């Protein structure tokens, strides 16, 4: 197999891996049945006039399955952290005990669980579309190479390898979705 074709395959695999990694990140932010420090990943706090990620102004932990504890490094940050969590509209109200911001995670209703499964499936579909787009781009590049003089059987072999990559990454997406659905629907 020539070097250009191998480069296309490597680039395609990297692109598909990025799609799966993005899916993993998106699914980690969808609340399952348990509290997770990842649930507060996208929150930014006003830290002396600049917007700063919560993880850079406080320690976030989960002391039990239904609680997230946020321990600010400065006591003055308790109120801005509470405001940021409330503004994020995550479905829970933070409280404080003077040193910690505590977020109690309410149990989910069946309706809420189904809505979260639907959101997870939407994220999965986006990942599959991204994987298919990478396949399409690779196949277009291979077709250009065939027109430029590459042997047709070598091009077909390349397209078959691209399809194998697509099947592999599509199955990874499915496995992630099944695991997340099981996590969400477990009471």
Image (spheres, rainbow, N blue to C red):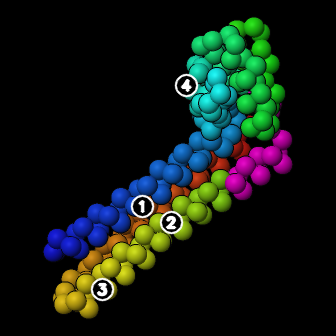
Is residue 117 shown in magenta? yes
What element does badge 1 sit on? helix
For the residues marked 1 and 3, what is the alpha-carbon distance in whole angstroms?
Answer: 21 Å
For the residues marked 3 and 2, what is the alpha-carbon distance in whole angstroms?
Answer: 21 Å
Question: In terms of image quadrants, where is residue 187?
Answer: top right
Q: Give the range drawn in magenta.
A: 104-119
For the residues marked 3 and 4, what is the alpha-carbon distance in whole angstroms?
Answer: 48 Å
Which residue position holds label 1? 16
Work out whether mark 3 precedes mark 4 in sequence or the reverse, and give the earlier one.
Answer: 4
Query: Which numbered disc, 1 or 3, marks the residue closer to the eye?
Result: 3
Which residue position holds label 2? 130
Work out whether mark 3 precedes mark 2 in sequence or the reverse, and give the earlier one.
Answer: 2
For the residues marked 1 and 4, what is the alpha-carbon distance in whole angstroms?
Answer: 31 Å
Which residue position holds label 3? 144
Work out whether mark 2 precedes mark 1 in sequence or the reverse, and give the earlier one.
Answer: 1
Residue at x 66% of width, y 60% of height: 122
Q: Is residue 17 left or right of residue 41?
A: left
Query: Which numbered disc, 4 or 2, marks the residue closer to the eye?
Result: 4
Residue that extends furthest to the left in the rendered view of this protein: 2
Which residue position holds label 4? 56
The answer to the question of whether label 2 and label 1 lie on touching residues, with beta carbons closer than 8 A, is yes
């Amino acid at each position: 197999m020539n070097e250009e074709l191998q480069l296309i395959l490597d680039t395609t695999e990297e692109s598909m891996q990025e799609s799966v990694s993005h899916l993993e990140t998106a699914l980690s932010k969808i609340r399952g049945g348990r509290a997770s420090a990842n649930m507060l990943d996208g929150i930014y706090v006003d830290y002396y006039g600049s917007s700063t990620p919560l993880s850079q102004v406080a320690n976030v932990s989960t002391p039990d399955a239904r609680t997230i504890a946020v321990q600010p490094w400065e006591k003055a940050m308790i109120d801005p952290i509470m405001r940021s969590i409330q503004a994020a509209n995550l479905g829970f109200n933070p409280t404080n005990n003077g040193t910690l911001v505590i977020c109690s995670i309410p149990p989910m209703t069946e309706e809420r669980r189904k809505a979260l499964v639907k959101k997870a499936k939407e994220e999965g579909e986006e990942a599959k579309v991204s994987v298919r787009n990478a396949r399409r781009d690779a196949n277009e590049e291979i077709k250009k190479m065939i027109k430029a003089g590459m042997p047709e059987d070598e091009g077909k072999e390349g397209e078959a390898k691209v399809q194998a990559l697509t099947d592999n990454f599509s199955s990874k997406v499915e496995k992630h979705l099944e695991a997340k659905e099981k996590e969400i629907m477990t009471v």
